[in-house]
Image (tube, rainbow, N blue to C red):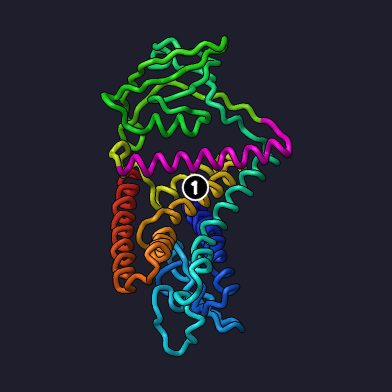
């Protein structure tokens, strides 16, 4: 029964976030007079379609792993039955730009609102990387770091939040030695060279253990909630940027990523921890969806924005065949990566 509930919750969460994203594209496309064929939640075979009074097909498809707004002339004039002024490709560049970034913007706004609501109703957790405790016989304790000390840098990169500390400790370091900057309770500072202990977790993955936990202090207040939402938002974006950078530089393995199966596992464990953590998960996934889509990679919104900016710079349209090929190859690569990550996630379950 719990498996069914977890799957339903995952479908509801992803469906909600995709809806938020696609509504951004949809609203601004209609606003600027672009002809829309279909507004779809999900991918694959159509389960249900309703034709609206505006002539648009509103669909629900079988697989809750995406969604789309199908517009006329997204890249080139592809339908001689539609007036040319209704093609997206014939709209001013700034209108096309707004349509493309609207989905990402909606996801970012959604994440900020949810983080604000968490802080308002449940309190704003402290984000400072102040150490609550160190585990005896583990690297931090052996180095002489104690409770109350604050981590101010990792490998010479300043750390103002625990999120940033976490990602920097996950990334591979030269010779597996991490240079940890510490500010003690008396205001003095020291730098320690720390080598984590290698161990294996329940899923069978090799992990690094430092033996440290962060102080978790919760405060309430309207202005504090606003500050928390924006600080946490910026901290998570920074974490995601380091993740992407780590993948390209080899400091982070692709196996560290999670696909639908991995997210399913996270949903299952989060449902047991209370409403605040469930809302936080939705906020995190919304931010993640927006961040990934803003990347200048083929088939993502950011990849399409990149072509618009290139057109603006060179002052002429790019050959539609080249752009289509670019996005097609990108889409295939993304699907292959998704298959690999999903297979890896399934293996970790057993």
Image location of residue 163, percent across then percent down: 49, 34
Image location of residue 80, percent across then percent down: 42, 89
Q: Nearer the viewer, residue 55 or 33?
A: 33
Q: At 43% from the left edge and 73% from the top edge, which residue is drawn? A: 74
Secondary structure, mark 1, is helix
Q: Nearer the viewer, residue 51 or 71?
A: 71
Image location of residue 178, percent across then percent down: 35, 23
Image quarter for residue 30?
Answer: bottom right
Establish if 103 lies above or below 143: below
Magenta residues: mostly which secondary structure?
A: helix
Residue 220 in magenta? yes
Total count of labels: 1
Residue 300 visible somewhere in the drawing: no
Residue 227 visible somewhere in the drawing: yes
Establish if 32 lies above or below 101: below
Left or right relative to 58: residue 338: left
Q: At 44% from the left edge and 75% from the top edge, which residue is drawn? A: 89
Q: At 44% from the left edge and 69% from the top edge, which residue is drawn? A: 62
Establish if 344 lies above or below 335: above
Image location of residue 117, percent across then percent down: 67, 45
Left or right relative to 257: residue 27: right
Q: Nearer the viewer, residue 187 or 198?
A: 187
Residue identifier under label 1: 267
Image quarter for residue 330?
Answer: bottom left
Q: At 29% from the left edge and 24% from the top edge, which residue is drawn? A: 176
Which range of residues does the magenta coloring cover?
A: 219-248
Q: Quadrant of the C terminus?
A: top left
Left or right relative to 321: residue 23: right
């Amino acid at each position: 029964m719990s498996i069914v509930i977890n799957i339903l919750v995952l479908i509801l969460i992803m469906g909600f976030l995709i809806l938020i994203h696609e509504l951004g594209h949809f609203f601004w496309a209609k606003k600027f007079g672009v002809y829309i064929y279909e507004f779809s939640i999900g991918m694959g075979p159509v389960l249900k379609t309703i034709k609206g009074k505006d002539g648009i097909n509103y669909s629900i498809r079988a697989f809750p792993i995406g969604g789309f707004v199908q517009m006329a002339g997204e890249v080139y004039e592809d339908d001689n039955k539609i007036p040319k002024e209704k093609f997206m490709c014939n709209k001013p560049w700034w209108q096309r730009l707004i349509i493309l970034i609207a989905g990402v913007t909606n996801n970012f706004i959604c994440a900020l609102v949810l983080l604000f609501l968490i802080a308002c109703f449940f309190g704003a957790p402290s984000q400072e990387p102040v150490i609550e405790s160190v585990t005896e016989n583990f690297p931090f304790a052996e180095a002489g770091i104690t409770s109350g000390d604050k981590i101010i840098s990792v490998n010479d990169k300043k750390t103002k939040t625990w999120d940033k500390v976490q990602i920097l400790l996950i990334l591979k370091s030269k010779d597996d030695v991490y240079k940890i900057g510490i500010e003690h309770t008396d205001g003095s500072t020291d730098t320690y060279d720390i080598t984590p202990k290698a161990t294996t977790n329940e899923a069978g993955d090799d992990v690094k253990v430092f033996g440290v936990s962060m102080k978790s202090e919760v405060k309430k207040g309207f202005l504090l909630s606003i500050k928390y939402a924006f600080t946490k938002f910026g901290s998570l974006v920074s974490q995601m940027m380091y993740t992407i950078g780590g993948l390209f530089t080899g400091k982070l393995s692709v196996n560290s990523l999670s696909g639908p199966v991995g997210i399913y596992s996270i949903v299952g464990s989060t449902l047991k921890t209370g409403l605040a953590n469930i809302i936080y998960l939705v906020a995190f996934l919304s931010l993640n969806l927006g961040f990934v889509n803003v990347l200048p990679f083929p088939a993502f919104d950011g990849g399409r924005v990149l072509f618009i900016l290139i057109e603006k710079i060179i002052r002429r349209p790019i050959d539609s065949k080249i752009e289509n090929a670019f996005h097609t190859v990108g889409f295939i690569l993304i699907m292959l990566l998704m298959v690999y990550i999903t297979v890896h996630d399934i293996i970790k379950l057993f």
